[in-house]
Amino acid sequence: MLQAHSFLWHYLWVAPNVLLLILAFLVWRRGLHRNYPIFFIFAIVAGTGQLVLYAADVMPSVSARVFWHVLWSGLLVEALVKFALIGELFAHIFGPYPSLARLGKILMRGVGVVLVFIAAMAAAFSPVSNPHLIVSGPHLLEQTIYLIEAGLLLFIFLFAAHFRLGSGQVSLGICLGLAISACVHLATWAVAANNSSAQTSVLLDLLHMAAYHLCVLIWFYYILVP
């Protein structure tokens, strides 16, 4: 069961993304997409992108090169939407406080520059899992995205906590889900860097997918429960 292409593997890849698309539909039905348009777009892009990637993985007619091109494209698009979503969450949390918002933007830009530098250094010294860039590149890109994402979310949490600001239920839930997903991915990447066995890699992938499933359920709760 705890192996690639097992029932659990298929479920953890498909179910969270189907639920995410359902969440996007419910957000639209309740009119919440007007307040959180970027999250609405993120739910559609992330859910659809992962389902397309899943189809490319299981369909015998899709070549390995096409699969990796689909993965590259999905990562780049999802990364852009994620960073836009973080900006939207920042605006919701600090928007009512103009002076704090201005200070936060300045500090956030500085933190972003530092995080990009750290992510670039981490990618440069990371062990290469495959000599072909089209295969190893997405893993390094994903690691870079999650590292910057986790750092920006941590800054938002700490900055809001320092000034004792109430972030609101929806903003808190979205931030929490993104942070859990990013931290679990970075933790599994750190373990994988020191253990390259195939069985360990599969178990870490399952752990990451399970954490993502949990994050989608967290978004359901914080967004839809009054």
Image (tube, rainbow, N blue to C red):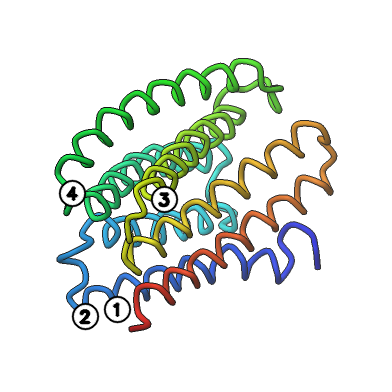
The residue located at (14%, 44%) in the rendering is 98
As drawn, the label of residue 26 is 1
Mark 2: secondary structure? loop
Mark 4: secondary structure? loop
Camera-side residue of 54 and 196: 196
The amino acid on which the numbered mark 2 sits, given as a three-letter code, is Arg
Which residue is label 3 attached to?
Answer: 161
As drawn, the label of residue 30 is 2
The quarter in which the N terminus is drawn is bottom right
Q: Position of residue 94 (x, y in %)?
A: 24, 49
Q: Nearer the viewer, mark 3 or mark 1?
A: 3
Which residue is label 4 attached to?
Answer: 97
The residue located at (38%, 45%) in the rendering is 156
Q: Is residue 99 left or right of residue 150?
A: left
Give the residue at the far front of this rendering: 163
Label pair 1/2, CB-CB below 8 angstroms? yes
Q: Is residue 8 left or right of residue 105?
A: right
Mark 2 and mark 3 lie on one chain; the one further toward the N terminus is: 2
Q: Is residue 29 above or below residue 114?
A: below
The residue located at (45%, 43%) in the rendering is 70
The quarter in which the C terminus is drawn is bottom left
Mark 1: secondary structure? helix
The amino acid on which the numbered mark 3 sits, given as a three-letter code, is Ala
Mark 4 and mark 1 lie on one chain; the one further toward the N terminus is: 1
